[in-house]
Image: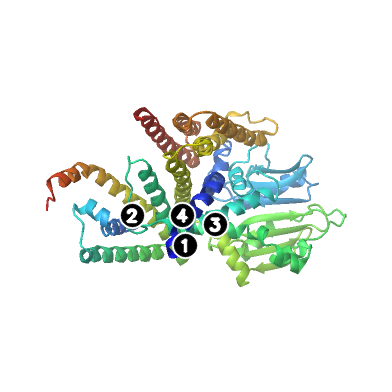
């Protein structure tokens, strides 16, 4: 039994890794980028030049604009302006369906700002994969569980965990790839395990819905109310009533929330007698999310309900979820999440590459060749596709209709084209070509960040230059190797 | 300062592994000699965590940051060991050909 355990775990590690590897690579890279979700949105909105805004004033302006232009929407959902994101992010419904736009902090209008999803695209793609509900989430959940399984079996499979803790021997072919894979896996193992486990927990209710189904049958409203008793839901009355002035409501909420401030506001049934304003506190002082909620009566501004979460099971879930999304994270921790996320992306990439290298020595057959080619398309192509999202955002005219949708379609078009290109071309040629393209795309992102006046543009340019340098180095190594062969 | 404390700790930890001890000191340390840098490394890591907790508003935040810093420092230490090993490779060849220098 003991003799067969490690080989069995190695086999499981290899196959769970290769089956979900490409999907995980895209999920992890998009998740890593969404650590800087508000900053990416800001980068994609060069019109937003204000460094600081008053969150309450921005909210008042947003509510005023929505009252005038989106009074028919069943609800308005706002992420309030914050130092990281000096704009209100609003979600409402109009004649074209639901729309999400940043609103100008002064005028409250989205008209002066270009239509883009910004960082929301990476955040949503990370767990929805641009697929309809629930398919994207189901796939992301399966991928998270597979990542956890691959990590645990990888620990068992790694023979010299502590002895080779700091070992990397470059220029030795398969040995170097294995060293890089082990090193990237071992040094950030706590992060990898945490992010895989919390990711799986975040989507667990999709896989284990039976407790909620048994308890609430199909009454989702009651389930939602029990989860957050202060989130009052009332049916529309049909009697018109203006919304109370928002400033006193904001002040009351601020007093109740203290230094965490207001993070989210939901106005349900605006303009109706049954309107409800629900405010959720920020969570910059705790790891867990959404622990304090207050609902106000829309027309009068009176408090309807207030809830501070203290139930152990929900608090545990909130902490696990909070650890995953890192909304609590101060600057340094956010950067550490970003770097560790890049390490996890590289870990998956080296694992995929290792799988093909280890099989290339044996008689190569169609499956191995195809995987080797698609590896080039996915591992080198995904960064190109994601970088193109930034470039397209700056290139497309600001006033174009359905601009946000077009930006996202461009990403998938470029991604698909690169996959087809990689599938048709020998891997040894595709690798340096696509890596060179990735380097060029990142360098272009740095250039498009000009004139680098805003901190977010300067930081974006620095990261893009570093990535461009890494891809140039990888492309050069890759083409040199071809020449030697 | 906090980062450097951690980096020193992980370099000392690298010194306690067989392969990297040879890289950093030219010859492998005996298991008894390895105990000293290992002990100092753990002390430095504990000091780093203490400093982190003192500087942070929350112990939980400090623990998360310390874990993340350790990963980056370990990666740095691995890069340092790799660069040193590459630099000393011809020496290793001489050692193999002409015997130990010690």
Determine contact: label 3, label 1, CB under 8 Å: no
Determine contact: label 1, label 4, CB under 8 Å: no
Question: Marks 3 and 1: which is nearer the front?
Answer: 3
Q: In the rendered structure, which disc, 2 or 3, sits on the residue that comes first in sequence?
A: 2
Chain to which the residue tagged by mark 2 belongs: A
Q: Are marks 4 and 3 on the same chain?
A: yes
Residue A319, position as x, y percentages in the image: 56, 64
C-alpha separation, residue under disc 2 versus residue under disc 4: 18 Å
Would residue A228 be found to the left or right of residue A351 on screen?
Answer: right
Residue closest to the eye, A159 or A144: A159
10 Å neighbourhood of mark 2: few (<14), some, or many (≥20)? Answer: many
Q: Which mark is residue A324?
A: 3
10 Å neighbourhood of mark 4: few (<14), some, or many (≥20)? Answer: some
* Residue that numbered label 2 is attached to: A164
Location of residue A250 with respect to B91 vertically, above or below: below
Residue A80, position as x, y percentages in the image: 63, 51
Give the secondary structure at mark 4.
Answer: helix
Q: Quadrant of residue A101?
A: top right
C-alpha separation, residue under disc 1 versus residue under disc 2: 30 Å
* Residue that numbered label 1 is attached to: B61
* Residue that numbered label 4 is attached to: A10
Residue A165, position as x, y percentages in the image: 34, 55
C-alpha separation, residue under disc 1 versus residue under disc 4: 35 Å
Chain to which the residue tagged by mark 3 belongs: A
Chain to which the residue tagged by mark 4 belongs: A
Question: Marks 1 and 2: which is nearer the front?
Answer: 2
């Amino acid at each position: 039994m003991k003799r067969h355990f490690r080989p069995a775990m190695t086999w499981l590690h290899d196959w769970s890794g290769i089956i979900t590897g490409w999907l995980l690579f895209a999920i992890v890279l998009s998740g890593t980028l969404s650590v800087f979700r508000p900053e990416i949105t800001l980068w994609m909105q060069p019109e937003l030049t204000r460094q600081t805004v008053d969150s309450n004033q921005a909210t008042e302006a947003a509510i005023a604009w929505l009252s005038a232009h989106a009074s028919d929407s069943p609800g308005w959902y706002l992420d309030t302006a914050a130092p990281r994101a000096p704009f209100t992010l609003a979600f409402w419904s109009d004649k074209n369906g639901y729309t999400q736009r940043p609103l100008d902090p002064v005028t409250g209008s989205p008209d002066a700002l270009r239509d883009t999803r910004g960082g929301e695209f990476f955040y949503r793609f990370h767990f929805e994969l641009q697929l309809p509900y629930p398919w994207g989430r189901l796939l992301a959940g399966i991928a998270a569980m597979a990542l956890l399984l691959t990590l645990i079996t990888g620990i068992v499979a790694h023979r010299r965990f502590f002895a080779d803790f700091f070992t990397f021997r470059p220029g030795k072919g398969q040995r170097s790839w294995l060293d890089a894979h082990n090193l990237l896996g071992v040094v950030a193992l706590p992060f990898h395990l945490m992010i895989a486990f919390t990711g799986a927990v975040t989507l667990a209710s999709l896989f284990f819905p039976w407790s909620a189904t048994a308890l609430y049958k199909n009454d989702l409203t009651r389930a939602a109310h029990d989860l957050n008793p202060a989130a009052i839901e009332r049916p529309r009355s049909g009697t018109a009533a203006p919304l109370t002035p928002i400033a006193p409501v904001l002040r009351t909420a601020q007093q109740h929330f203290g230094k965490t401030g207001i993070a989210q506001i939901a106005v349900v049934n605006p303009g109706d007698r049954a309107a409800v304003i629900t405010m959720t506190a920020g969570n910059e002082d705790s790891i867990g999310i959404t622990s304090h909620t207050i609902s106000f009566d829309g027309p009068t501004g009176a408090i309807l309900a207030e809830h501070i979460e203290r139930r152990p099971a929900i608090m545990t879930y909130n902490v696990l979820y909070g650890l995953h999304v890192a909304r609590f994270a101060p600057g340094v921790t956010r950067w550490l999440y970003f770097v560790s996320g890049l390490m996890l992306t590289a870990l998956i990439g080296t694992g995929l590459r290792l799988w093909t290298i280890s099989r290339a020595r044996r008689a190569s057959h169609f499956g191995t060749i195809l995987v080797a080619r698609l590896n080039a398309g996915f591992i080198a192509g995904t960064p190109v596709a994601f970088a193109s999202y930034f470039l397209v955002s700056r290139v497309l005219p600001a006033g174009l209709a359905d601009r946000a949708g077009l930006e996202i379609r461009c990403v998938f078009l470029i991604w698909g084209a690169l996959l087809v290109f990689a599938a048709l071309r020998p891997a040894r040629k595709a690798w340096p070509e696509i890596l060179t393209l990735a380097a060029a795309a990142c360098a272009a992102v740095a250039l498009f960040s000009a004139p680098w006046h805003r901190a977010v543009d300067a930081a974006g340019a620095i990261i893009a230059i570093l990535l461009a340098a890494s891809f140039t180095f990888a492309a050069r190594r890759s083409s040199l190797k071809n020449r030697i062969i | 300062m906090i980062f450097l404390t951690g980096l020193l700790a992980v370099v000392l930890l690298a010194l306690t592994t067989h392969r990297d001890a040879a890289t950093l000191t030219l010859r492998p340390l005996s298991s008894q000699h390895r105990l000293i840098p290992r002990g100092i490394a753990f002390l430095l890591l504990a000091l780093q965590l203490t400093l982190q907790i003192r500087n942070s508003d929350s112990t939980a935040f400090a623990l998360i940051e310390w874990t993340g810093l350790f990963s980056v420092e370990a990666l740095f230490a691995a890069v340092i060991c790799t660069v040193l090993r590459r630099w000393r490779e011809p020496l290793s060849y001489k050692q193999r050909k002409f015997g130990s220098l010690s």
